[in-house]
Amino acid sequence: MAHRVAVVVVNGTTQFELAVAYEVFGIDRSEYSADWYEFALVAAEPGPIRTQGGFLLDTPYGLGELRRADTIIVPAAQCERGVPEPLLAALRAAHRRGARIASICTGAFILAEAGLLDGRRATTHWIDAAELAARYPAVTVEPDVLYVEDGNIFTSAGAAAGIDLCLHLVRMDLGSDVANAVARRMVVPPHRDGGQAQFVDAPIPRGDTDTLGPLLDWALAHLGEPLTLDDLARHASVSTRTLVRRFQAATGTTPLQWLLGQRVRRAQHLLESTDEPVERIAGLAGFGTAANLRQHFTRQVGVAPMAYRRTFRGGTAA
């Protein structure tokens, strides 16, 4: 049976975040996977639903649809009259039965109002993060990240970060090749880490862009080698201090943190798409030893490499 995604709309739902969820899950992309999603737009209030911009939405699906949804997505919304209590009750019931629940941008306020974020880490748009933390002190708000995964609850920052989260969910369900194909169709980056900063400190000077582009391509082509900060700076023909400054401005992270993230993603892809043993994957991804791979992979992904492989492929290779 196909994985069923339900996107909940209320009066005051914003168009962009709703469109993100539809673009990723609602369009038939069965050419990428025979197990593509079933999709339902669910009205949390008697229709038609009026979006923040004044558009009217008419859907045959009501809150009863949440009882059979595998994933529930709550886009950003401005609920001027408060969150409808039937929606909060339906979200709590879905959570109790084990449904995966995600919010985009200020949709996190709806999850928090339902109590689903109590004792959890969560994020929202950085402008609204302080208000979320103040209104719901039981929530650990992380204001500087793109998205947060805490158990079967997912929250994302504003606007484009919702794309990152939705693609992350596709990657979890159907693998990196399918997620990358969807990203290419949408003309967006295939993967940005949830821990990446929501915004960069300053515009990137033209010279920095020209320097970093070839450097990133070169580093990706040499992931299997023991690259150091000096190696990266030497290839970019700049000092290490200059490289760190430019890298931070362009990506929101440091060169070595970026490199580690790319190596983990290379290992994920190899675990999903090959039967190579962990020792071989460690070498191909640049970790050197299986022990190093397990340490860094488990820290970043949350599970050990072999557990990750079993989740995505049912593989048993050692």
Image (tube, helix red, strand yellow):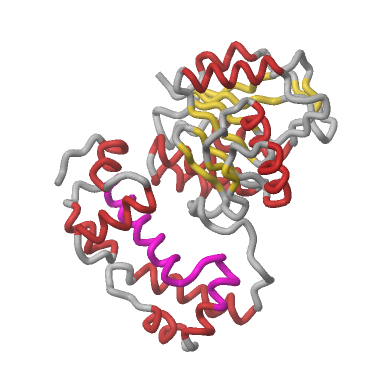
Task: Answer above or below: position of 178 versus 244.
Answer: above
Is 93 left, or right, of 104 in this rendering?
left
Task: Answer above or below: position of 299 versus 22.
Answer: below
**x and y percentages locating residue 292 in the rendered image:** 25, 61
Is 191 left, or right, of 290 in this rendering?
right
Task: Answer above or below: position of 89 versus 166.
Answer: above
Q: Which residue is drawn at 39% across and 29% down?
A: 34
- Specify whether residue 18 is in view: no
Q: Residue at x 24, y 48 (%)?
A: 274
Magenta stretch?
245-273
**x and y percentages locating residue 175 in the rendered image:** 38, 41
Task: Answer above or below: position of 252 versus 174.
Answer: below
Between 75 and 132, the one lying in front of the other is: 132
Is 34 left, or right, of 101 in this rendering?
left
The majority secondary structure of the magenta stretch comes to helix
Q: Which residue is drawn at 70% across and 42% down?
A: 134
| Residue farthest toward the left in the current orientation of the protein | 318
**x and y percentages locating residue 153 in the rendered image:** 51, 34
**x and y percentages locating residue 27 in the rendered image:** 57, 32
Does the magenta segment cover residue 263?
A: yes
